[in-house]
């Protein structure tokens, strides 16, 4: 629903929204379940962060509740990322932001 709103408002492309859904599922999966090499996980993580930034910025632009705080948290986290960090899983996902910042009830009301 959220991604569809962003696509309709031309804030992200449909292919980016579809790719985000795929990568989001992989990023949230347990490490043991990932059947990917370390370098593949690194590249997926980098691609995911770019798409997550687009999504969160889009949510901020449409006025979704708590999106400005989520954007700030994301930018702060991305500022701490270094080239060697790919050795550990990156835990900042859209679900993580939703759980930690604001109220998911507010977000659901906004999109209904």
Image (cartoon, rainbow, N blue to C red):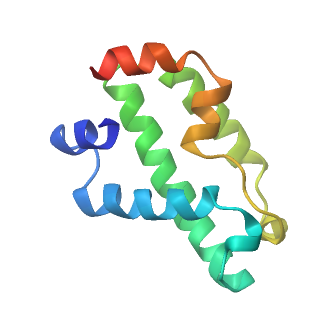
Question: With 25 as the anchor, is 65 left or right in this view?
Answer: left
Question: With 108 as the anchor, is 26 left or right in this view?
Answer: right
Image position, residue 51 (x, y; %): 46, 55
Question: With 17 as the anchor, is 55 left or right in this view?
Answer: right
Residue sitting nearer the eye, 61 or 23: 23
As drawn, the residue found furthest toward the left would be: 8
Q: Is residue 41 above or below residue 109?
A: below
**Residue sitting at x 60%, y 75%:** 43
Q: Is residue 47 above or below residue 91?
A: below
Image position, residue 108 (x, y; %): 39, 21
Residue sitting nearer the eye, 75 or 108: 108
Image position, residue 72 (x, y; %): 61, 29
Quadrant where the image shows the C terminus: top left
Image position, residue 93 (x, y; %): 60, 46
**Residue sitting at x 59%, y 22%:** 69
**Residue sitting at x 71%, y 62%:** 30
Quadrant where the image shows the N terminus: top left
Give the number of callouts. 0
**Residue sitting at x 70%, y 86%:** 37
Residue sitting nearer the eye, 33 or 62: 33
The image quadrant of residue 8 is: top left
The image quadrant of residue 63 is: top left
As drawn, the residue found furthest toward the front would be: 33
Q: Is residue 65 visible?
A: no
The image quadrant of residue 17 is: bottom left
């Amino acid at each position: 629903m959220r991604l569809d709103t962003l696509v309709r408002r031309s804030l992200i492309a449909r292919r980016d929204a579809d790719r985000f859904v795929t990568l989001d599922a992989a990023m949230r999966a347990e490490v043991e379940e990932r059947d990917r090499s370390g370098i593949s996980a690194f590249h997926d993580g980098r691609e995911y962060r770019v798409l997550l930034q687009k999504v969160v910025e889009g949510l901020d632009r449409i006025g979704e509740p708590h999106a400005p705080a989520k954007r700030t948290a994301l930018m702060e986290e991305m500022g701490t990322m270094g080239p060697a960090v790919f050795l550990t899983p990156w835990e900042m996902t859209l679900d993580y932001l939703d759980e930690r910042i604001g109220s998911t009830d507010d977000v659901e009301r906004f999109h209904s």
